Amino acid sequence: MLGRSIRAATFLLLFSVLFVVGDAADAKSINITVIGASNANGKGVSSSEAWPAVLENMLRSKGYDAHVTVNATNGLTSGQIVSLTGSIPSGTQIVIFDTGISNDHRHNFSAAQTAANEAAIVRGIRAHGAVAIKAPYGNPGMHGGYPKQGDGEHFTPAGHRMIAAKLVPRVIAAARH
């Protein structure tokens, strides 16, 4: 009986090791571009604390060969972000975008204008053959309840980590297609 238990435990251990090694070995490169405004740019935090860098590190810790490029500038409106879709690097599989909605509000954009610009962003991303994922910031003004800096608009390092964690499964799912 003891011999059978040892063989079963050995089998389970070998199966687990092969499964984990196989999963990491099967992980492919994921080329991600982030476009947007200040929260995508990491305003008020170091570049290593901003969600794009945190996302890259989280994906790598899961065995993915992730490469994240950021093309974001503080203050951009959704209309200006549309133009960033023209500079998506070749080979990009996933584009995560921020609409700059707070900036749209400051510039008195209508909800319809912001929605039309968001649709144009998605079309521009798809025209490059990439999957579009909207950054999960939540409702305007609330920014999804993520911890914010003293200005009430930009995320703290903890907020950036929460956003990155929310994006990990979405990026993995998109990369599998």
Image: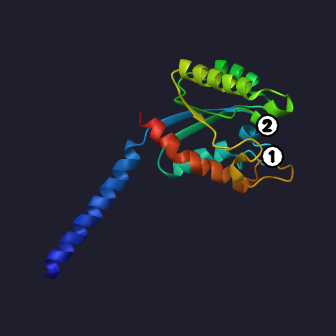
- Which residue is at the front of the view, 169 or 15? 169
Element carrying mark 1? loop
Q: Is residue 41 visible?
A: yes
Element carrying mark 2? helix
- In the rendered image, which quarter contains the C terminus? top left
Q: Which residue is mark 2?
A: 102
Along the polypeptide, which appears first: circle 1 or circle 2? 2
Residue 12 relative to residue 112: left or right? left
Q: Circles 1 and 2: CB distance less than 8 Å?
A: yes
Q: Is residue 57 visible?
A: no
Q: Residues within 10 Å of mark 1 (few under 14, many from 20)?
A: some
Dot label at residue 91: none
Is residue 113 positioned above or below 141 on the image? above
Counting from the top left corner in percent of width and height, residue 16 is at 31, 60
At a point 33% along the width and 59% down the height, the residue shown is 17
Counting from the top left corner in percent of width and height, residue 94 is at 54, 32
Q: Amino acid at mark 2?
A: Ser
Counting from the top left corner in percent of width and height, residue 95 is at 59, 31
At a point 74% along the width and 44% down the height, the residue shown is 47
Residue 33 relative to residue 46: left or right? left
Q: Amino acid at mark 1?
A: Glu
Q: Which residue is mark 1?
A: 153
- Which residue is at the front of the view, 53 or 153? 153
